[in-house]
Amino acid sequence: MEPVNEERAERTPVRERLMDAAYAEVVAGRWTQQRMADIASAAEVSRQTLYNVFGSKEGLLQAVVVREADSLLDKVVALLEEDRSDPVHAVSRTTGFVLRSLRDNPLLRAVVAGDRELLPVVTTRSAPLLDVLGERMAAMLAESCPELDRSVTEAVADVNLRLTVSYALQPIDPDEAARRVEAVVHGMLCVGLPEAGRTRG
């Protein structure tokens, strides 16, 4: 077992230290070359502890990306709160914000532009990420539009997230992407909430 800095161990939970160490490797472009033992050593825990907490290297990466995306979603929710009376425009506005953040955030940019180990976290094995973000967005829409059926808010959240990921992987102008997402969300909300079609005149 690698030596542990007891003072640091008391200050920062093991899970956070491991994710911080993984974050540093991804941003530095060293993720593919790093072994679990290297990451555990950087976090000052044993390799077995790392496996116990995250199960695998991909599980650790997913947790790091979810943490970063969840933090981003806190800001998204704040923006959505500002446009509670106009959920269609709120989703469009936040989509543009998310795409600009993906472009500017070191970790998310590294993942989107990453290699065969990084990219699957937002593509073929993105379920953990989409589940977390989808639940939060659906809950926000349900709170903002109580008239909507839960199936509608879940569908809107799911489609919005998938479109956002798609535009992140093949970027276009964030404002144009936001306008296109707004058109899609507008149509979906009009089906479930006719009043939404009249919100923006």
Image (spheres, rainbow, N blue to C red):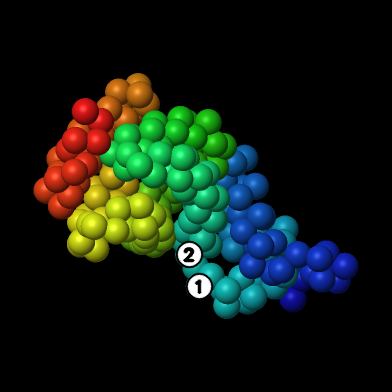
Secondary structure found at label 1: loop
Front one among 103 and 147: 147
Neighbour tally class for label 2: few under 14, some 14-19, many 20 plus, Cα within 10 Å: some
The reply, left or right, for residue 19 in relation to residue 153 is right
Q: CB under 8 Å between callouts 2 and 1?
A: yes
Residue 93 appears in the figure = yes
Residue 115 appears in the figure = no
Q: Name the residue under label 2.
A: 59
Front one among 143 and 65: 143
> What type is the residue that disc 2 sits on?
Gly
Quadrant (top left/top right/bottom left/bottom right) for the N terminus: bottom right
Q: Name the residue under label 1.
A: 55
Q: Give the Cα separation between the discs numbered 2 and 1.
A: 6 Å
Front one among 156 and 21: 156
The reply, left or right, for residue 42 in relation to residue 85 is right
**Residue at position x 32%, y 30% from top?**
178
Q: Position of residue 176 (x, y in %)?
A: 30, 23
Quadrant (top left/top right/bottom left/bottom right) for the C terminus: top left
Q: Where is residue 126 in the image (x, y as percent from the top left)?
A: 35, 55
**Residue at position x 36%, y 38% from top?**
90
Give above or below for 185 relative to 23. above
Q: Position of residue 103 (x, y in %)?
A: 47, 31
The reply, left or right, for residue 93 in relation to residue 197 is right
Q: Residue furthest left?
A: 191
